Image (cartoon, rainbow, N blue to C red):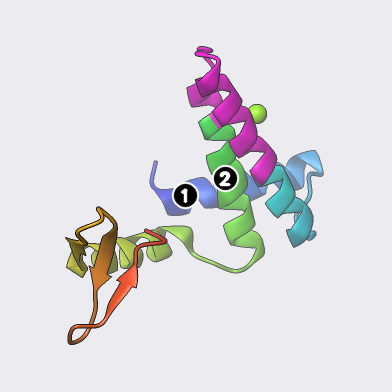
Amino acid sequence: MDVRSAQKLVMENKHIKGFNTTDVPLEFCLLQGEIAEAFDAWRKNRPDVGEELADAAIYLLGLADMVGADLQGEIEAKMVKNAARAYHRLPNGVLVKARDGDETEERSSL
Ligand SMILES: [Mg+2]
């Protein structure tokens, strides 16, 4: 299944079940909760870490749809952008993104 199809199916399920489809701040909080559940499962070496990550992915797909984002297109564009980025390591070990000229920016996001 591709990301775009998954996003559509997540929203169909939300509508069928009567889940949240309009409250964006709530959806961010619910996504955060699923990330926390996944972390807790991993930290405690529980076998459901993959299931909790799936929950997080499902919430992310729903949230993307709620804000009008085509997550597949966004991921593809971002991966191209990331692949083109160059990084170098400072003497103190911090990895920084090379920018136009000699400008650098501390790596804070993917
Ligand atoms: Mg969960």
Q: What residue type is labelled 1?
A: Ser
- Nearer to us in this view, 35 or 103: 103
Residue pictured at 56% horizontal, 21% vertical: 41
Label 1 residue near ligand 1, CB within 8 Å: no
Q: Where is residue 19 in the image (x, y as percent from the top left)?
A: 78, 44
- 47 falls in the magenta region: yes
Q: Which mark is residue 5?
A: 1
Task: Say which quadrant the N terminus sits in.
Answer: top left
Q: Which amino acid does label 2 sit on?
A: Leu
- Tell me if mark 2 has few (under 14), some (14-19) or many (20+) residues whose alpha carbon lies within 10 angstroms of its own: some
Label 2 residue near ligand 1, CB within 8 Å: no
Marks 1 and 2 close (CB-CB < 8 Å): yes
- Nearer to us in this view, 38 or 105: 105
Which residue is under mark 2? 9
Q: Distance between the residues labelled 1 and 2?
A: 6 Å
Secondary element type, mark 1 = helix
Quarter of the rendered image showing ligand 1: top right
Which picture quadrant has residue 23?
Answer: bottom right
Residue extent of the magenta highlight = 32-52
Residue pictured at 35% horizontal, 63% vertical: 107
Magenta-drawn stretch, dominant element (helix, strand or loop): helix
Up-down relation of residue 20 to residue 24 (above or below): above
Secondary element type, mark 2 = helix
Up-down relation of residue 25 to residue 77 (above or below): above
Taking 33 as reference, is 73 left or right? left
Residue pictured at 52% horizontal, 33% vertical: 54
- Tell me if mark 1 has few (under 14), some (14-19) or many (20+) residues whose alpha carbon lies within 10 angstroms of its own: few
Q: Position of residue 14 (x, y in %)?
A: 71, 45
Q: Where is residue 83 in the image (x, y as percent from the top left)?
A: 20, 62
- Nearer to us in this view, 101 or 12: 101
Q: Position of residue 72 (x, y in %)?
A: 41, 58
